[in-house]
Image (cartoon, rainbow, N blue to C red):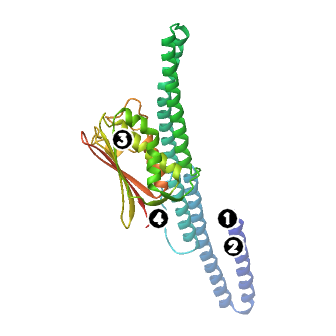
Amino acid sequence: MKNKEFFIPVIIGVSATAAASTIMLFMNKSGAIICAALGIILIAIFCFYTNRRYRAISDLNDYLLLVCSGNYDLALEDNTEGELSILQNNLLKVISQLKTQNEVIAADKTYLADSLADISHQLKTPLTSMLVVSELLEKEEDEAKRKEFTEIINTQCEKMSWLIQTLLKLSKLDAGTAEMNIEPISVSEVIENSLTPFLLTLDLKNINVKKSIDDFTFSGDKNWSVEALQNIIKNCIEHTPDGGTLSITTDETTVFSRIVISDNGCGIAKEDLPHIFERFYHGKNSSSESVGIGLALSKTILNKENASVSVTSEKGSGTQFEIKFYKSVI
């Protein structure tokens, strides 16, 4: 009875019933009794339903307090009709969304922590190497040795620079802040630009490049597309022996346009295939210099361009990457 919204109507109802019954008493005793009985019944009905409504509101309030404390594993079983039921259902929808968002945030925090640990590990190796070599460089008087140490430091600096730049690109793509100038571009031009940085390496390793290019256009960003193909080509070259073959072919269907990049290198172990596009993943045949983010970056870029990339491989028989640029979104 402390609630004014409950207490005041009851007082008014009792007062009205008493007044009506008193007036009826002077007119008809039976009428006064009936009037008093009806008044009491109506007040009792009002008290019953109002009390039940306040209990439901109190239960909702207790439920929300538990949700605020982080307990999302509760359920409201009462689902009767009425305004409170509508409110309850809407609350359940909001709470379900909050629970999903909370799980996503928790997963993101775990992923961020794992990524930071991986990045720290990747940076620690070249940093340690540079510190050791710099100490040797200070004490070394032989000019040839000093030049060798300087080259080692430069190589490690380039590796760190590439790692940081690639991580920044991935972060921009993940956050949706990377500017992608989507326009029709020629696949033959993208392939030629992707191969250019590796011409010297291909020549030194005597790797034969076989191209069968059926030119087509696809919607994408030229620079980002070149970046994606370069990482795939780089992976193939690293795993192709001297005198090996790198093949690049293209074709079209009514559904998609396709680029196939393959090599006849050492191949990828069966257990590594499902994880080849995961960030910082190192397969059994990965080189010691591999960081494990190049292919992850390629997949992220291609997905942004409504394309997909898949890989098939047999150990000792080479690897094939298949890129599909879909012509329409279904």
C-beta proximity under 8 Å, tags 1 and 4: no
Residue drawn at x 54%, y 38% is: 165
Residue type for callout 1 = Met
Residue drawn where x is 38% and y is 35% of the image: 203
Give me the residue at 51% from left, 22% from top. Answer: 153
Classify mark 2: helix, strand or loop: helix
Q: Quadrant of residue 242?
A: top left
Mark 2 vs 4: CB contact within 8 A:
no
The alpha-carbon separation of the residues under discs 2 and 4 comes to 31 Å
The residue depicted at 53 percent of the width and 54 percent of the height is: 221
* Label 1 to label 2: alpha-carbon separation: 9 Å
Which residue is disc 4 drawn over?
Answer: 77
- Which residue is disc 2 drawn over? 10
Report helix, strand or loop for mark 3. helix
Crowd band around label 1 with a 10 angstrom C-alpha radius: few (<14), some (14–19), many (20+): few
Disc 2 packing (10 Å; few <14; some 14–19; many ≥20): some
Percent of width and height locating residue 305: 48, 56
Specify which label sits upstream in the sequence, 1 or 4.
Answer: 1
Q: Identify the element where label 1 is drawn.
A: loop
Along the line of sight, the residue nearer the viewer: 141 or 38: 141
Circle 3: is it few (<14), some (14-19), or many (20+) Cα within 10 Å? many
Residue assigned mark 3 = 236
In which quadrant is the N terminus drawn? bottom right
Residue 195, label in figure: none
Question: In this image, 317 relative to 261: left or right?
Answer: left
Disc with the residue nearer the chain's start (1 vs 2): 1
Mark 1 and 2 residues: CB-CB less than 8 Å, in contact? yes
- Figure quadrant of the C terminus: bottom left
Q: Secondary structure at mark 4?
A: loop
Closest to the camera, between mark 4 and mark 3, is 3
Left or right: 33 as drawn, with respect to 139: right
Instruction: Decide: few, some or many residues near mark 4? Use Cα within 10 Å; few <14, some 14-19, many ≥20.
Output: few
